[in-house]
Amino acid sequence: MPVEYLTLPYLTTGLVCLLGGVMSSWRSGQPRKPAVMAAALAFVSFLGAAREVIAVGHGHLVDPLLPCFDADGLDAVPMAFYAALTLMVVVVAPRRDAGGRAMAGMLIISLATQIAYAAAGWTTLLSGWWLSCLPFVFGMFGVQHSNKLAIGLLIASCVALTASVAVMHAETFGNFSPGGELTFGLLVLAVMCRKGVFPLHSGVVQAFEKGALLPVVLLFNGHLGVLLVAHSEAAVLPQSAKHAFDILSVLAVVSAFLISIRAFAETKPRRLLAFLYVSQASFILAGIAAANIAGITGSLVHWLALSAASTGLICIVRVLEVRVSSAENPMVHLGLAVKAPRLATFFLICGLALIGLPGTLSYCGEELIFHGTLANHPAVGITLLVTSAFNAINLIRLYGILFLGVLPKHVIDIPDALPRERWPLTACVVFLILGGLFPGTIIGWRAETVQAIEKALGVAAVSMPQR
Amino acid sequence: MSLQHLIPLLIATPGVLFLMLGTLWLLGGQVSERAISRMSKATHAFLVVVVVLIAWAMWRGNMVSMNVSLGDWFTVAEYGFPLSLLIDKLSLPLVGTTVVLAGIVGSFSVRYLHRDPGFFRFFLLLHLFTFGALLVFTAGSLDLLVVGWEIVGITSVLLIGFFQYRPDPVRNALRVFATYRVADLFMLTAVFLSHHWFGTASWAGMFSGDWPGSTYKFDGAAATVIAVLLAFAASGKSSQGPFCGWLPRAMEGPTPSSAVFYGAISVHAGAYLLLRVEPLLHHSVIATSLVIFIGLTTAFLGTLIHRTSADAKTSLAYAAQTQIGLIFAEIGFGWTTLAVIHLVGHAMLRTLQFLRAPSMLWDYHRVHAAAGGKLSPTGSYYESLLPSAVQIWLYRWALGRGFYDSIVERWVMAPVLTLARWLAIFEPRFPRRQPEAEPSTKVVETPVS
């Protein structure tokens, strides 16, 4: 099959822009400007790549300068989308989070995630996976003694993936060879550590609670775990892989359900947000594992919706913490809607979009996931429905804690959404609502990948041998 | 303009107004009270004209129902989300009631909420609610009905928490939302199972013929399961049966929203759903019996509690619950025309009562004075025929509101919270180097930007 190339080196350009942004913002006195510039240029580059991939409609388009990078239906759209999220985060970041090292750290995470997306092989993906964890390991967002569990689990995910790739390269295995089972077992472990699948969710929760919130959102909204699973599924892996991913899907459903229950006992906004995030993110894995077109499409759509909504929510929580320090651990309801009604509204819309209010993009995603899972396992579909209801209740609890109730006496005057915050948040909300009103376009972007994954899974199922 | 255009126009108008006003405000724009009130009045007047035109066109064309298909919202493989709207003998009265009552409440609220900080928010939510309610009553499928159903639910909750600077509305809004979500689970499960088992959730796919003479196409236990699920979903929206505790909590919202939601439209959405799926209900003895049982028991409970309630709005809430219970029973018995008349009449009367509630004392004194002195007592009640011990027991039971809240807290919320706390064992906590500082209560004012 002849290799097809992108017409321009979009991927290289995007990655170089991000690298340039890292270097120029690190020592800069005004790091936000170069960071925003780099993120914007990277967004334009990745958008170009995505447009080209969608226009071609099939296969991989290799970067003409660096052939170890390519763009395909699975990762081209998330690449452009993730670049937009990076731009949003660096624009919204409060001044205290926008120091040189912090900005550079955020751009490194973005660069690493884009490398993982654009990777044409396992080794490149692995390097992106490792690189995305390094800013946390090296304390680029401040020394975080109390964040050891989160960092430990991140490193564990890297080690597990490295081992898996090493075994994969070392031997060729059949459908149920021990090497195959080990490889995909390790792969599943890597995904579990990275995505915070139950019972390893405490790492993500701690990262949200103790870590720097904005870099954390960039780290987890890359959804590299899902990318790994989707890539593996699309690659027509042996039957042992399918079994490993079946186990992962069960764990994802259990994770979504139990974490949504766990959140009822939580009152700290950051932890509550973390539980919501992990629970909703587990829907993506559950949908992909449904192995039918509805489930996989729902997952790939929910991926985008979840990323946009959670980024909006986390940005708002962070800007509130900067304004009112007691927002980190409020003893009572904070009642901030009186002083910051626009932030409250943005929060509510993003939150409702996160849990699948009709008219938002995630409604479409969740609807398809429910249909997909219900078609395979009715119990799974109903469990996800219950989870969605619990998450909605927790979201309104979180909204109540932050924005409703009696305004504490010490909060005299805080600004509402600043223009720098208002425009990116409006863009986020518009994406979520327009995406929800006209989801056909976004489904169309993902259609080719869905077909590829579904076909690959179908082939795997047909070729299942007798043990 | 044909019906094919008028019906979507009717639904879309309040939605578009909501989106326009909302986006303008989010981007920093301000809209004056006068502009909002004029826009709202103009919109509602326009909606009334559109409804009249639709009714006129249907009457002239001798049409029993009108189905407008707008294609699929989205399609994936063999699954499509149908965007179809239906106007028939059931939906037209409810659409008319919605438009008229929302207009009246909007007009009333212009003065009632004058200079209230939440004036803009109220009207924004009122338009969103109108959009959601119209969608519920005109949806051509369960899928689309769910969309309107959830929009009505969320606007309802946001209006209960309208006075967000007081703790009680916030607490009650959360409780109502939780009840809604649990009840909506039944609805969503019914929708998905309907697709799963029958491959459709549209009225045209499920029923043949026009309402009220339509018949159900499918058979068997699956149909019973879906009917029971829908009966519970309807109970949740209409505060009946196991979900009967939320309606008095919803009275925390401003009076106009109580009128339009809990007197008039939202609370009747459950009854509408039962009327719409009435052929499915009557296909199953279990579902029919369930609806009658839920309706009658709630009516009994409601009328008892209504008599012991000390404040006007709570009393009205229980009175509304009682009447809706009776409407449920009427639907269960198959008296659909009576149920529709009862529903529309009740919505109108209850709206009037709610809107007059703030001036109830003033009204009483006026009537009292007009009667030339003391008003005659209202007479004895039927419960006085009961033995006094039973009367006292019923009084205590009603005063405790059937101990509903205690039951829910003890048998539903407490076990869930216990499980939630127990799940914390999967989150190891390492010993800290230093004791954690108390959360600061100082405001950091400068480094915002």
Image (cartoon, coloured by chain):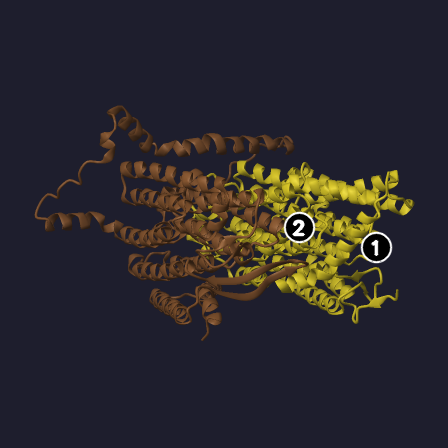
Chain colours: A yellow, B brown
Q: Secondary structure at mark 2?
A: helix
What residue sits 61% from the left and 41% below the top? A383
| Residues flagged by tags 2 and 1 on a common chain | yes
Number of the front mark, 2 or 1? 2
Tag 1 subunit? A
Which label belongs to residue B82?
A: none
Q: Is residue B428 visible?
A: no
Amino acid, disc 2: Gly
Q: Quadrant of residue A304?
A: bottom right
Tag 2 subunit? A
Amino acid, disc 1: Gly
Relative to B10, residue B263 above or below: above
Near-viewer residue (A171 or A400): A171
Q: Quadrant of the N terminus of chain A?
A: bottom right
Label 2, on which residue?
Answer: A372
B284 lies left or right of B326: right
Label 1, on which residue?
Answer: A121
B15 lies left or right of B77: left
Near-viewer residue (B384 or A330): B384
